[in-house]
Image (cartoon, rainbow, N blue to C red):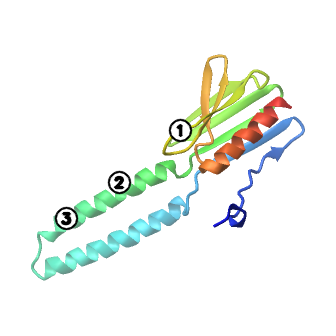
């Protein structure tokens, strides 16, 4: 399929008087509330089937039903912990601020935009890494983008740092 037929992803930089802001989020197809409903429905169905087998005399099935529900719950908790992850990049008032939220941990990095450089490290597997470097500090950004969008993001961020 030719590349011009593929949908183009737009990076929406928010323009402001003093600079711009960009928030990059994970591509999560459902909210934590929807995931809770799915978990509840799967748990009830699994428990009903297990109870049905127990009534029919196959009671050793019940511990495995409990194990299945516990494993499913653990998987959903891991998913939910990272569903709200994001990166926010802001340039304004003579500073570059990168805020990274992963699980329950938030980190904030402040860099000097006049000295910060965008570095693209080509890698195998997951594509290129986009790094912001300034005076010994290094911050990876664009982790929630696909490989082509990551390169486009690096070019745009580099251009905006030169303005």
Residue 69: x percent and y percent? 30, 63
Residue 140: x percent and y percent? 59, 34
Q: Residue at x 71, y 46 (%)?
A: 152
State which quadrant residue 115 falls in: top right
C-alpha span from label 3 to label 1: 42 Å
Residue under circle 3? 64
Alpha-carbon neighbours of circle 2 within 10 Å: few (<14), some, or many (≥20)?
Answer: few
Which comes before the other along the chain, label 3 or label 1? 3
Q: Secondary structure at mark 2?
A: helix
| 157 sits left or right of 26 in the view | right
Disc number placed over residue 144 in the picture, else none: none
- Tell me, yes or no, whether the two marked residues, 3 and 2, touch with CB atoms within 8 Å: no
Q: Secondary structure at mark 1?
A: loop
Residue under circle 2? 74
Residue 109: x percent and y percent? 65, 28
State which quadrant residue 122 falls in: top right
| 142 sits left or right of 156 in the view | left
Residue 43 in view, yes or no: yes
In the picture as drawn, the residue positioned furthest to the left comes out as 57
Q: Which residue is nearer to you in this view: 117 or 123?
A: 123
Which comes before the other along the chain, label 3 or label 2? 3
Q: Which residue is nearer to you in this view: 127 or 34?
A: 127
Residue under circle 1? 123
Number of numbered discs overlaid on the protein picture: 3
């Amino acid at each position: 399929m030719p590349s011009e037929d593929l949908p183009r992803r737009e990076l929406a930089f928010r323009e402001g008087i003093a600079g711009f802001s960009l928030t990059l989020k994970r591509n999560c197809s459902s909210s934590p509330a929807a995931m809770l409903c799915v978990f509840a429905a799967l748990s009830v169905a699994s428990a009903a089937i297990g109870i049905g087998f127990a009534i029919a005399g196959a009671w050793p099935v019940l511990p495995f039903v409990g194990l299945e529900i516990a494993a499913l719950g653990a998987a959903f908790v891991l998913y939910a912990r990272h569903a709200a992850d994001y990166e926010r990049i802001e340039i304004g008032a003579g500073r570059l601020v990168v805020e990274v939220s992963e699980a329950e941990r938030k980190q904030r990095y402040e860099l000097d935009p006049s000295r910060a450089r965008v570095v693209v490290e080509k890698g195998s597997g997951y594509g290129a890494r986009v790094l912001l470097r300034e005076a010994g500090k290094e911050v990876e950004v664009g982790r929630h983008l696909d490989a082509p969008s990551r390169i486009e993001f690096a070019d745009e961020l580099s251009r905006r740092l030169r303005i």
